[in-house]
């Protein structure tokens, strides 16, 4: 099946309309008619080659919401007409300890990424900036009623990537959580941490988005460009989730953690981050990382969002605005996720 898509032809090149081939629907596959695809900063890192060489052309997009158009004979979880989502992962071995523990993203054989990944049949996967996709039904999520489709799309990456560390490190009542960077991931981290009952502080470069941050559920909001912030908040937080797409001064942020506090890095900048171990030793602190989340946890997050009336704050765009949107994301001028209306691709 030949379908419309938007692809980057080579590293750092603007995206342009194209068509791509989707595989035939296998017995455990579903064909999804895509409605919305979010723009994640990871799409931009990939297209720009920040993370090293990638296969090109690449059709990015791993925040996909659509409707099941066809289901293979063995598919029981999803039916034609169901509203579904696909995140960053479309397959994994299913057998290793990590897969069996619901951590398919850490599959020892390597998870298959939704785009620029090597599929089990050796072909390169292509993502959600497209009208249709064929995905193994076990990696397809149910998008509950009650979350608007465009607002649900970013949950498939920004939502789960922040929900996983918040849940994993016990964000909840009595916990002080800071979120560094109020972009796509950051704004979901604020909403989710607030809904989980934690006390939430935003650490943003400036106070430009303070009103938004407080409206999204933050209790406090500080500018990291003001050195006084780091004195005022020293030793304060149990958990810091860093969503910044560039390098940060890790030691400065570790200094904001209480004894036994953890800084979880989900931001994935091109450059290595360095730290002084005394920032950890001095208060039994931890520095950790986290990548997206497993399928069961992703479904839990979607159900949690439906229950709490949460979705992303989105700016819906047409496909031909993708390159402009990339520039605005790079300039931290996103409030708070661009989402492509895929009906504009045809
Ligand atoms: P985004 O929307 O661009 O948000 C990043 C935010 O970081 C910006 O809005 C800005 O917030 C802050 N920021 C940007 N440049 C900065 C700089 N030079 N110094 C300080 N702060 C800066 O990006 P996103 O889509 O949320 O993604 C964020 C990062 O997470 C990316 O690196 C992405 O690849 C990564 N990611 C990781 C995973 C995972 O599984 N670990 C999953 C998805 C994405 P303020 O304006 O508030 O300062
Ligand atoms: Zn992403």
Image (tube, rainbow, N blue to C red):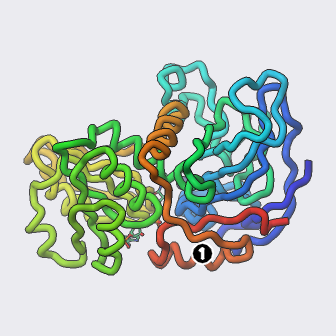
**Residue 133 position within the rendered picture, expressed as x and y whole percent measured from the top left:** 77, 47
Ligand 1 resides in the quarter of the picture at bottom left
The 10 Å Cα crowd at callout 1, few under 14, some 14 to 19, many 20 or more, is many
* Residue 320 as seen in the image, left or right of residue 112: right
As drawn, 23 above or below 235? above
- Picture coordinates of residue 7, whole percent (x, y): 75, 64
Residue 251: horizontal and vertical position, in percent? 20, 59
Which part of the image, by quadrant, shows the C terminus? Answer: bottom right
Q: Residue furthest front?
A: 146
Do we see residue 123 in this rendering?
no
Residue 204 visible? The answer is yes
For label 1, the SS is helix
Q: Residue at x 44, y 56 (%)?
A: 268
Which residue corresponds to the image point at 67% horizontal and 45% vertical from the top-left?
Answer: 117
Residue 230 location (% of width, % of height): 14, 67
Q: Which residue is mark 1?
A: 325
Q: Nearer the viewer, residue 257 or 316?
A: 316
Residue at x 54%, y 25% (from the top left corner):
99
In the rendered structure, the answer to whether residue 225 lies left or right of residue 13 reads left
Between 34 and 59, the one nearer to me in the picture:
34
| Residue shown at the point (68%, 77%) measured from the top left | 321
Q: In the rendered view, does 238 fall on the left or right side of 30? A: left
Tell me where residue 76 sits by quadrant: top right
């Amino acid at each position: 099946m030949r379908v419309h898509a938007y692809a980057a032809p080579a590293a750092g090149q603007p995206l342009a309309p194209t068509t791509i081939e989707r595989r035939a629907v296998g017995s455990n596959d579903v064909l999804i008619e895509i409605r919305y695809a979010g723009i994640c900063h990871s799409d931009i890192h990939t297209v720009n080659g920040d993370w090293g060489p990638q296969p090109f052309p690449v059709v990015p997009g791993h925040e996909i919401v659509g409707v099941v158009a066809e289901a293979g004979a063995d598919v029981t979880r999803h039916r034609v007409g169901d509203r579904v989502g696909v995140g960053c992962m479309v397959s994994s071995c299913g057998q290793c300890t990590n897969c069996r523990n619901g951590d398919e993203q850490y599959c020892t054989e390597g998870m298959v990424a939704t785009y620029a990944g090597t599929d089990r049949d050796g072909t390169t996967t292509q993502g959600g900036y497209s009208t249709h996709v064929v995905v193994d039904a076990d990696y397809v999520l149910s998008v509950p009623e009650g979350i608007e489709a465009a607002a649900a799309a970013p949950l498939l990456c920004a939502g789960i990537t922040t929900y996983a560390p918040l849940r994993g490190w016990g964000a909840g009542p009595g916990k002080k959580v800071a979120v560094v960077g109020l972009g796509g991931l950051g704004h979901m981290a604020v909403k989710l941490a607030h809904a989980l009952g934690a006390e939430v502080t935003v650490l943003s470069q400036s106070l430009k988005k303070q009103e938004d941050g407080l409206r999204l559920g933050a209790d406090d909001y500080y500018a990291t460009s003001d050195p006084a912030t780091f004195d005022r908040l020293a030793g304060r937080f149990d958990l810091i989730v860093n969503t910044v797409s560039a390098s940060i001064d890790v030691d400065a942020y570790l200094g904001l953690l209480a004894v036994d506090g953890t800084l979880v890095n989900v931001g994935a900048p091109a450059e290595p981050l360095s730290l002084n171990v005394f920032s950890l030793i001095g208060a039994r602190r931890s520095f950790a990382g986290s990548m997206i989340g497993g399928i069961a946890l992703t479904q839990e997050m979607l159900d949690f969002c439906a229950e709490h009336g949460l979705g992303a704050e989105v700016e819906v765009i047409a496909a031909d605005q993708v390159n402009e949107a990339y520039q605005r994301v790079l300039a931290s001028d996103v409030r708070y996720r661009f989402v492509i209306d895929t009906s504009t691709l045809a």
